[in-house]
């Protein structure tokens, strides 16, 4: 007898597992299909997708460990702490990261059990429909078994995979994408990185802090072009001059080869040209949607010109009762964006009014200093001819930042010149990832800069810089 579910989710990343859990919470019979084992020692399917296994979580674990090492070797002294002979044990750092991943992926299994979500281990793909009432989805197990389940609703959450560059073969030993780059067993003496985006800068920072000589080749002539220009300028200064990351912009890459001297990457950039020689190379040039083996073509699933599943504002595809969320659909490839879409879809299936405000999705880079923003950049407002007022406060004017020994960066707030409504907030500095939450809440509630200026912020905290930036919009900061 064919198993039937109200909702079948394909993919168990942040988009997929959240969709399945929320659907089950709403009273639906829900199943989630996942095939990847991400090198699980027992060969079992691992839940959590890219984010938990080879993305957000492991990268943040390594960033934290390497930051502690950097603090011990470079920053403790200013606090009067002498820590001679500090050594980095890379295998222990990587083991810790793997333990965190195991704990979290196992945790999702627990959440599936608690919420009565059925896990279907295998590769999911469309077969067709049963009497035009139910979707038939095939689940192909690793052992070759093939099962077909019926679903009233299907949620595609198959995520993304690293974009490949022609002629550069990733083996995840010497030439790595995010998977290999999160598992080096020693610090490479010379690390090359192609792409100065989020992965390049986060993972470049990890290995730089641990002692690698890091060179990043970026195709675009501008650094961090999606960020506010003031933030990008400050980040460039800190990453290159202070931290010693070598970044070449406007880089064109030639034929990559491997030999006695390691990997050779010929390049021509705006400021230099030559051969970059390195012991490991990370290729981080963006990610592309993953619809491999989904068999969407057989049922007429529409993709857009960038091979993403085409959806409307509510994540409905062109097929009845087929939805898609997360990295496989347009929008920023961020875990929290996928999770929000997942909740919206489950609630819409239940007839509720779930929605996602894509204008208030925060962006965060977990470098040091961290970079976070929400809403419009100053250059976007200028391009859109929007009249605005700006307030910017450096952390150098913040007592807590001074006490912590790190005054890098600033908070910048942009508000509408006519209504004072907050249009964008940009933070570069310690804990920017946490500070941005206040700005997201404010923007969701349609707050003005005056609203933030009139709210009591605890003293001494970094959040006071947000308060002062709001005051600065009205040209009346109290401490700057
Ligand atoms: P995925 O997480 O990619 O999950 C999709 C899952 O579907 C996979 O497990 C895949 O095996 C499975 N699948 C695919 N096809 C099928 C099929 N046919 N049948 C069954 N299963 C299938 N985002 C942030 O917000 N913050 C961060 O700090 C952050 N850091 C990152 C660091 C790195 C190194 C990387 C690579 C990414 C990072 N991201 C971060 C991005 C984040 O990981 C993704 O946005 C997020 O994982 C997308 O979730 P998803 O559910 O759409 O897809
Ligand atoms: P990215 O889009 O952030 O950066 C890719 C960079 O590579 C860009 O700057 C691009 O101009 C450059 N590039 C492209 N082709 C190139 C070429 N041929 N030569 C040199 N440079 C080239 O992509 P990513 O760093 O690979 O990360 C992928 C996605 O994962 C991101 O878009 C992001 O959504 C997600 N991610 C998020 C976080 C976070 O939220 N903190 C962290 C890591 C990854």
Image (cartoon, helix red, strand yellow):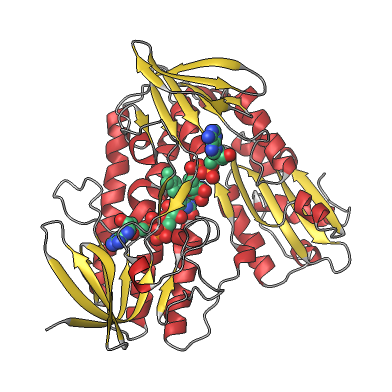
Q: Quadrant of residue 403?
A: top right
Query: Residue 335: x, y in percent?
Result: 46, 58
Q: Is residue 435 above or below residue 410?
A: below
Rendered residue at 22%/83% (across/down): 4
Out of 175 and 296, give the one closest to the viewer. 296
Out of 328 and 102, give the one closest to the viewer. 328
Q: Quadrant of residue 230?
A: top right
* Residue at the extreme top: 260
Q: Is residue 14 above or below residue 220?
A: below
Quadrant of picture, ligand 1: bottom left
Rendered residue at 37%/33% (across/down): 176
Is residue 79 in sight in this rendering?
Answer: no
Rendered residue at 42%/82% (across/down): 320
Q: Quadrant of residue 350?
A: bottom left
Left or right: 405, with 18 as reference point: right
> In this figure, what is the number of numbered marks?
0
Rendered residue at 79%/56% (across/down): 381
Is residue 270 in sight in this rendering?
Answer: yes
Q: Is residue 10 above or below residue 374?
A: below
Q: Is residue 14 above or below residue 411?
A: below
């Amino acid at each position: 007898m064919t198993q039937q579910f109200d909702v079948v989710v394909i993919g168990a990343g942040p988009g997929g597992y959240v969709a399945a859990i929320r659907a089950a919470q709403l009273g639906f019979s829900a199943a989630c299909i996942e095939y990847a084992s991400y090198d699980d020692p027992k060969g079992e399917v691992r839940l959590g997708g890219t984010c938990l296994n080879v993305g957000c979580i492991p990268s943040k674990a390594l960033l934290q460990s390497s930051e502690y090492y950097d603090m011990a070797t470079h920053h403790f002294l200013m606090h009067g702490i002498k820590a001679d002979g500090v050594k980095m044990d890379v295998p222990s750092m990587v083991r810790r990261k793997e333990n965190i991943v195991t704990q979290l992926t196992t945790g999702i299994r627990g959440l599936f059990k608690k919420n009565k979500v059925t896990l279907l281990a295998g590769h999911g793909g469309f077969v067709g429909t049963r009497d035009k009432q139910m979707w038939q989805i095939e689940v192909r197990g690793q052992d070759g078994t093939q099962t077909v389940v019926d679903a009233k609703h299907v949620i595609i959450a198959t995520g993304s995979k690293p974009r490949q560059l022609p002629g550069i073969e990733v083996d995840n030993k010497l030439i790595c994408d995010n998977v290999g780059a999160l598992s080096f067993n020693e610090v490479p003496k010379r690390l090359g990185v192609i792409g100065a985006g989020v992965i390049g800068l986060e993972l470049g920072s990890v290995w730089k802090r641990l002692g690698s000589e890091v060179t990043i080749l970026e195709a675009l002539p501008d650094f961090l072009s999606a960020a506010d220009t003031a933030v990008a300028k400050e980040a460039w200064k800190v990453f290159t001059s202070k931290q010693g990351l070598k970044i070449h912009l406007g880089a064109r890459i030639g034929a990559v080869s491997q030999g006695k001297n390691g990997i050779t990457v010929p390049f021509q950039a705006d400021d230099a040209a030559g051969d970059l020689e390195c012991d490991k190379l990370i290729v981080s040039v963006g990610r592309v949607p993953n619809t491999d083996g989904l068999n969407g073509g057989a049922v007429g699933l529409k993709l857009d010109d960038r091979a993403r599943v085409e959806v409307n504002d509510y994540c409905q595809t062109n097929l009845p009762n087929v939805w898609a969320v997360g990295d496989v659909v347009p929008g920023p490839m961020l875990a929290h964006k996928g999770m929000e879409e997942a909740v919206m879809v489950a609630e819409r299936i239940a007839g509720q009014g779930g929605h996602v405000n894509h204008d208030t999705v925060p962006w965060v880079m977990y470098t040091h200093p961290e970079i976070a923003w929400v809403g419009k950049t100053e250059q976007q407002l200028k391009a859109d001819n929007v009249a605005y007022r700006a307030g910017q406060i450096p952390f150098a004017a913040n007592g807590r930042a001074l006490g912590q020994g790190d005054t890098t960066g600033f908070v910048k707030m942009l508000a509408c010149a006519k209504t004072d409504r907050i249009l964008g907030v940009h933070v570069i500095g310690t804990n920017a990832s946490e500070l941005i939450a206040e700005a997201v809440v404010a923007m969701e509630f349609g707050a003005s800069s005056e609203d933030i200026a009139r709210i009591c912020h605890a003293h001494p905290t970094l959040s006071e810089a947000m308060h002062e930036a709001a005051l600065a919009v009205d040209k009346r900061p109290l401490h700057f």
